[in-house]
Image (spheres, helix red, strand yellow):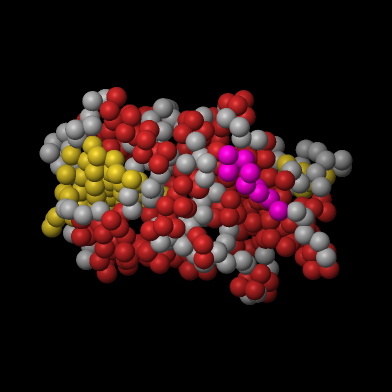
Amino acid sequence: MTQKTAEQQVLYPAVPTGRYARVAARVAEGIVRRAARLTGITVGTAADRPDADLVLIRPRDFYTRLGVGGLTGFGESYVAGDWESADLAGTLTALCRKMASLVPGWMQTFRGFYNARRPASQKNTVSGAKRNISAHYDLSNDFFATFLDPGLSYSSALFDGHPERTLAEAQDAKVERALDRAGVGEGSRVLEIGTGWGELALHAARRGAQVRSVTLSTEQADLARRRIAAEGLSDLVDVDLCDYREVTGTYDAVVSIEMIEAVGAEYWDSYMQVVHDRLVPGGRAVIQAITMDHQRMLATSDAATWITTYVFPGGVIPSVTALNGAAQRAGLHLGMRFSFGEDYAETLRRWDAAFLDAEGQVDALGFGPDFRRLWHFYLCYCEAGFAAHYIDVGQLEYVR
């Protein structure tokens, strides 16, 4: 997605109307009352309780969007301005901790009837994957620079019990750990699946490794190449604009940081087969992945969510069980798993604080207030997931 199309994108639909919408709104009111009892959050209108955790600006629109659209409607209603929260991340975290019980069990039985399924257009074929990646990562390099660290690492940092670390220091720690566990050193041949803006490739090249890094994002590839050239490391790093399925050759190590979420469940086996086939015997792969509980993944992997609709088309969060199964079928063996979900919550807190501080810069790039509300909600929504342990992040090591 280019900056121009981002401005034109519909960030929330019109409020649903009709008999079904009215009935759904009444049901949603009951669910919100139940949520308030279970979580302890307060709910009120701007007129009667402006200090509430969840302040309803347009109650009718809020309940209608929530009732018809579920969690997707909940996000849409925030972007539309139907409700506010002085502590958005805190409110979302409280709700997330009780996610499994917010909707009565008898209603969850009918989830398959009212949950929209992800559209076929988001399938991660070779052409579809490029389109999906572009929709998010090609927004604008300058946009991502407004809230990321100077190295432009767009994945969880590793604080590892050191909250005094700057974001840049914690991002470096994450990269260095991945390279250490993959055994990357002088003369290593390294395949990176998912370039980002080149930070990991730079770290590997500084160690003397020969790196091939592949990406589907034109914007990221262009900037990564410039950064690598600026350090005089172009002879050690090749950044290729291609699909991971198109890579040939063999490597001593494969490293992939939070790219697996963009692969799609139907392609996890193919992904792991590529990792296996590209590794030399005894070679190691380190894959940093956002994960969720296996049963939760099975229940939600085919659903269209607010995230897949407005932020990450084609994205699917795997479970460790699913990844290990795909790896085993490909002939890979699990070495070690290292989880640090709390650190992702802290990473997102820092990103969101920087993003809010950069309001003027974001506006100057041509992104409007609705877009800013969407990204603030997205960052807080993700923070809540990690803070509530609804999702996790970890580095998984596999050996051929």
Q: Nearer the viewer, residue 376 or 380?
A: 376
- Residue displayed at 40% across by 38% down: 220
From the viewer's side, name the closer residue of 70 and 212.
212
Residue extending farthest to the right is 47
Q: Quadrant of residue 306?
A: bottom right
Horizontal arrangement in the rendering, residue 300 relative to residue 159 (left or right)? right
Tell whether 212 sits left or right of 383: left
Is residue 197 toward the left or the right of residue 72 in the image?
Answer: left
Task: Give x and y (percent) for residue 119.
Answer: 55, 64
Foreground of the two, 336 or 84: 84
Residue at 56%, 53% (x, y): give it.
307
- On screen, residue 299 above or below 229: below
User: In the rendering, at what x and y percent does residue 152 appear?
Assistant: 41, 33
Stretch of the chain drawn in magenta: 4-13
In percent of the image, x 63 and y 37: which residue is there?
372
Residue 90 seen by the camera = no
Q: Is residue 124 visible?
A: yes
* Residue nearest the observer in this picture, 24 or 38: 24
What is the quadrant of the C terminus in the image? bottom left
The verdict on residue 154 being magenta is: no
Q: How many marks?
A: 0
Provide residue 282's location: percent of width, then percent of height.
14, 55
Quadrant hosting residue 16: bottom right
Query: Residue 6 magenta-drawn?
Result: yes
Task: Give the residue at x 23% y 25%.
Answer: 232
Q: Is residue 225 above or below residue 104?
A: above
Query: Residue 243 placed where, x, y %?
Result: 33, 53
